[in-house]
Structures are given as structure tokens and as C-alpha cells.
Amino acid sequence: MAEQKAKKRSVGLVVLTDIPGMGVVAVLRRRGKINPEKDDFHESYPGGCQVTCHGKVKPEDDKEDEALLREAGEEIGQEAAHKLLVQNRGRLTVLVDDREANAVTFGIFMPDPDFIHLIRLEVSSGGLELLPQSEIGNIRDLLRDFDKRTGVTDTNVIAMFPDEIKAVRLAFEILAPAS
């Protein structure tokens, strides 16, 4: 019987902020169509959404927070990563630590949305989405409802991996200020 390969640990961050006229929103990233890190350059589940940044812990990362800072720098740019994760290190909250998926997702509430101007998306990004709390019930399950190769073709649809849906829900429950 073949031995099952252990999943690499991954880290993520969901950022909430208060946008004038919109209220508190989760800052999500759309998955693009290409992924230069893969041999065939094809991204899985294109058009789906992910938390603000997400990626694998690498052997050179001593801690999860180092992996998160590296991934954030790669996915949203160094300046935005520094603002979110270095200047606000003590404000990070563990939202989900999913042992089955081998993933941990942190959250932070940034009352001032000015950090969004610092975001520099990577080439494989499909852009940003701002998700208000009122839309959480409309998030679709990316694994269950969509094909890995085709992904999400309707840009009005927000579809995410189950552990990330849970993280976004918890971010609003735990981090959003009471209205």
C-alpha cells in the first residue's frame, strides 16, 4: 500500500477593514488563471477567492509568522505586508488551525483602509474583492461546487475553500467592531 504524502503546512491571513460607505469588509484575493510556480502555469480553481494572503510554510521558515510575512510580501507586496504584519504583530488572532487541512489562518482588523493603497498584487492574482459581512451566506464552496480546471467563471460569485470560508466567518464574529 502506498504511503500517503503529508500535506505541507500552510498559513493565511484574512484582513478586515472599514470602508466608508460600505462598512466592515473582508479583503479577499481572486485566484488568477496562471501560476508561474507550476510546470504548466495553470492555476487550479481560477476565479475562486482566497483570504488576503495564503501560502505554504517552507523549510527555511523558522516560524509560521515568518512564513506568513514572506507569503504576504509575495502576494500583496512588501510594504503592505510590513504594515499589516510587522507594525501590527501583536494584533494578529488565530482564527482557524485546521489539523486535517494542515492550515492555520490568522486575522486582523485594520480600522483605517489606507493600507489597501499599499497592496501590489502578484502577476498570478485575479484582483481584490471586498466582501461585506452581509454576503457571507452567499459564499460558495469552491471544492464542492466548481471544477478544478475551469474554476469560477462568473465574477459576481464568491467561492472559497471551506477552511477559508470558516476563517472569514470567524473574522467577522471575533474581530469586527460591534455596530
Image (cartoon, helix red, strand yellow):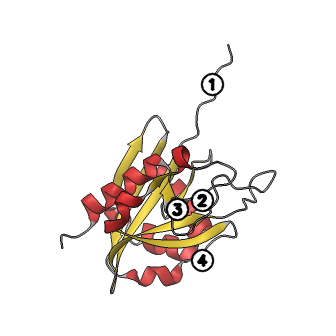
- Mark 3 and mark 2 residues within 8 Å of each other at the beta carbon: no
Image quadrant containing the C terminus: bottom left
User: Which amino acid does the dot numbered 2 rest on?
Assistant: Val
Q: Separation of disc 3 and disc 2 at Cα?
A: 19 Å
Q: Earlier in the sequence, mark 4 or mark 2?
A: 4
Q: Earlier in the sequence, mark 1 or mark 2?
A: 1
Q: Separation of disc 4 and disc 1 at Cα?
A: 37 Å
Q: Residue at x 49, y 65 (%)?
A: 52
Q: Residue 116 location in percent, x, y?
A: 47, 80
Q: Separation of disc 4 and disc 2 at Cα?
A: 23 Å
The residue to which callout 2 is attached is: 152
Task: Indicate the secondary structure of the residue bearing disc 2.
Answer: loop
Q: Earlier in the sequence, mark 1 or mark 3?
A: 1
Q: Is residue 4 left or right of residue 112?
A: right
User: Which amino acid does the dot numbered 4 rest on?
Assistant: Arg
The residue to which callout 3 is attached is: 53
**Tag shown at residue 120:** 4
Q: Earlier in the sequence, mark 3 or mark 2?
A: 3
Q: Is residue 139 above or below residue 83?
A: above
**Tag shown at residue 4:** 1
Task: Indicate the secondary structure of the residue bearing disc 3.
Answer: strand
Q: Residue at x 49, y 62 (%)?
A: 158
Q: Residue 154 location in percent, x, y?
A: 58, 65
Q: Residue at x 53, y 48 (%)?
A: 145
- Mark 1 and mark 3 residues within 8 Å of each other at the beta carbon: no
Q: Earlier in the sequence, mark 4 or mark 3?
A: 3
